[in-house]
Image (tube, coloured by chain):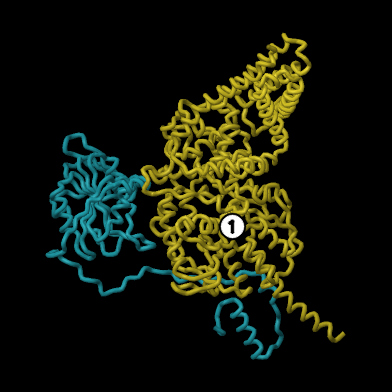
Amino acid sequence: MKTVVLVSGARHPVSRRPALTRLEAQAASLAAKLGGTVRGLHAGPSDDQLREALGHGLGEADWLEIEDRVDPVPALIDHLKAAAPDIVIAGRRGEGTGDTGLVPYALAEALDMPIIADVVGVSPGAGSGTVSIEQALKKGARRRLVVQLPVLVTIHPLAPPPSPFAFAAARRGTIRHERIEATGLPTAKPSPFVERPYRARPKMMRQAGAGQAGEKAVLVGPTPEEAAERILAFLEDNGIRRYSA
Amino acid sequence: MTPAAFLPYLILAMVVLAGLRLGQRVMLWRGGRAAHVDWMAGLKALPKRYLVDVHQVVDRDKSASRMHVPVAGGLVLASGLLVLGLVPALAASRLYWTLVTLAFLVMVAGVVLVARRRYPQPMARLSVGRWQRFPIYLAAFGLGGLVTAGLAAIGNPLPALSFVTLVIAAGGGLKLAFDAASGPIRHALAGATHLVAHPRPNRFDHDEAKGRSTGLQSIDLNAETLGAKTPSDFAWNRLLAFDACVQCGRCEAACPAFAAGQPLSPKHLIADLAAASSGGHHRPYGGHAYPNERPVAGEGGLHAKVISPDGMIHPDTIWSCTTCRACVEECPMMIEHVDAIVELRRFQTLELGAVPLKAEEPLSHYRGCDEPNGRALAERTDFAAGLRLPVLKPGERADVLLWLGQAAYDLRGQRTLRALIQCLQAAGVDYAVLGEDERDCGDLARRLGDEATFQRLARENIAALGSVTFNRILTADPHALHVLRNEYPAFGGTYDVVHHTAFLAEMVAAGQLTPQALSGRAITYHDPCYLGRYNGETEAPRALLDALGLERREMARSGKRSMCCGGGGGAPSADIPGDTRIPDIRMGQAKETGATTVAVACPQCTAMLEGVTGERPEVKDVAELLWEAVQASATAAPRDSRKAKELEPA
């Protein structure tokens, strides 16, 4: 059985660095447990995510290097047509900057493969050329399907947790690099918007400290000037506003 | 020929037998990885290492040092004298035999002291089994030799008795020699060789800062195997170190994980590693089992995997370690337990990815965003909103670079940092932080065996530190201090790093901060392992607390022999269950002093000790106590002036 695990160009939600998503790590582990020949596949400008997938159990991978913002689907279609895998496993949503989560559907249509979404388990089927797939439904329900190969599946988060990352496995795994020229492929237009991750403002916390208690003083009938001075001094002392700076 | 005349030949036979047996062991050591050893320097330093460094540790238990000097001294002296007995003129001299008798007498006196530690009831931390039988062989050799030589000294009046005692001496002596490679006596020869070929020779250099010999050594990430899978993956002098163990159990008595009922005993671990290298099945072990021992198959071999339920040691054992180094500090044979544990963890993490379930999360956060808690680097300074916290941009300079560390993300740690920053402002220190360019120092990743992540973070941090100018790095986290000071130099970053307790003590001594006495409060100071034991800094925090006028009470375990809070080495992440929790034990010790406040100097210790439930002393960082005292003096001053005003009319 030949399995290909699709790896997207996802980014880490906090650092925005290229990173493998948990779903795809689960896909890699699921494929590695299934056995047969398993390869990772990524089309994009860097191979960082693929390298990480190797650490989660993939032995080998193909990296189709294309420029940023170039649609990866045609390159993937060409590659998959030549490779003719039995099972293609993908994540189920975009988790990066430009990805849409529609790639598995586009591929299934172009390759004329059935697509099964939200899969939590794959095992060899009873008959030859079939595979038994467990699909997650709402409210914890599961559905078992026996499907004729080839098939494309997307992974559900409730699939078995990914096998832990091992640096040595990532180092030993091999990536076959192929450069795909962008000519003739449709290019996404650069976005007119500047994207910036949401950043909560730091909260101003009232200063806890023993010092304030000692300064408590009751002013009886202060002059307006004196009262204002004391209020400003209080705000200044507690770092709520700065007038002097 | 008198029976005594056979004694020199007995010694020769013992030397030959011991040599043959030990030869097998030497072949085993050669199965380890190559290591650079400066033999000449080691041999030259041997007497000092033995008489000073080893003795200082042994002497903490007086019954051990008082027993060892006569036994070992008597044995070596008697054997040495007896070899001279091969000279016929000497063998005929009664004076010579009197000297030999005296040497044996010293040894026998020592054997009596040994026996008193073991009979009728052995001390709890000692191993029994073959270790319990060891004094019997010593006594046979010593007493047999004593009577045989003694009779020769008075003219051999009872040849029949002399013959019987010679046979007894021969029996004991040959048994000792036969056990030279496998029995208790192995510690003498392996121990001496270990002192010469020690993997960390600079730990004996007392002029050097202590931290230089406690930092973990880095590994080549392009090596064929990362970390230790089998005994043969250890350097040969590490295998030698395992053989040097005397199973005195001091490590076990000091181990916080053992005390908490987690499946770790440093003594058992070292005994297992020594047994693993010689192969076969689990060797009889006479000490306490690992607490809540996990079942293992117990199969070992020089080229068999060690850490596995099918091997010698269960993975839970190595993940229980807090890397507090208490075992290393207590070991009279100078064994480096923590190095061995980290080496074993490296294989588990880097090659197998077999980290405990809960430790996967911080490691994956490290890979994704450089912080084990998964927070953005830009959020590190958020806690200081409203405080002046200058951020150094590349090319700028400050006198003191404040390394905030992971505490900046933790509400409790933030309180300490705020107090520290306010102290710095009050003292007029020129300080700044790295802001977004500060990544985690990588301490946790390294202790969990993820050397790859650590090395990446070290390089990135060194690059960030190289882009700005400063004189010193100040940090409130002893783990960051240790890593920056002692483990970054291997990657080209050498810095003057100071802990906040030392820095603030300096400020107070120089009069830049004038705290008012916080009298009427009893405190006890809990030494962080990474400050006290790893870096030898135990005085500055105490000096600072004394300057605050606090009544300082010491716990039974303090200074370099302090007990861990349970927060180091990734142990809270690994979270191996035990019978109780380490911080509960430590807080119990703090309570015993009757102190109302535990002064701490590490965010890990703060978190662990504050996690103790029920009635307990409050936990305050030294910086918080100082800031309280500084504020008290600021408010006290105007009060005094008011008093003066009141006095004026009268």
Chain A: drawing colour? cyan
Question: Mark 1 — on which chain does it sit?
Answer: B
Depth check, front residue: B89 or B498: B89
Residue B269 in view here: no
Depth check, front residue: B401 or B574: B401
Residue farthest front in this picture = B89
Which residue lies under the disc numbered 1? B602
Instruction: Identify whether A104 is placed above or below B247.
Output: below
Residue drawn at (27%, 59%), measured in percent from left and top?
A46
Q: Quadrant of the N terminus of chain B?
A: top right
Chain shaded yellow: B
Query: x%, y% of residue A70?
Result: 20, 64
Name the residue type under label 1: Cys
Residue A82 in view here: yes
Depth check, front residue: B395 or B449: B395
Q: Is residue A126 left or right of residue B114?
A: left
* Element marked by disc 1: loop
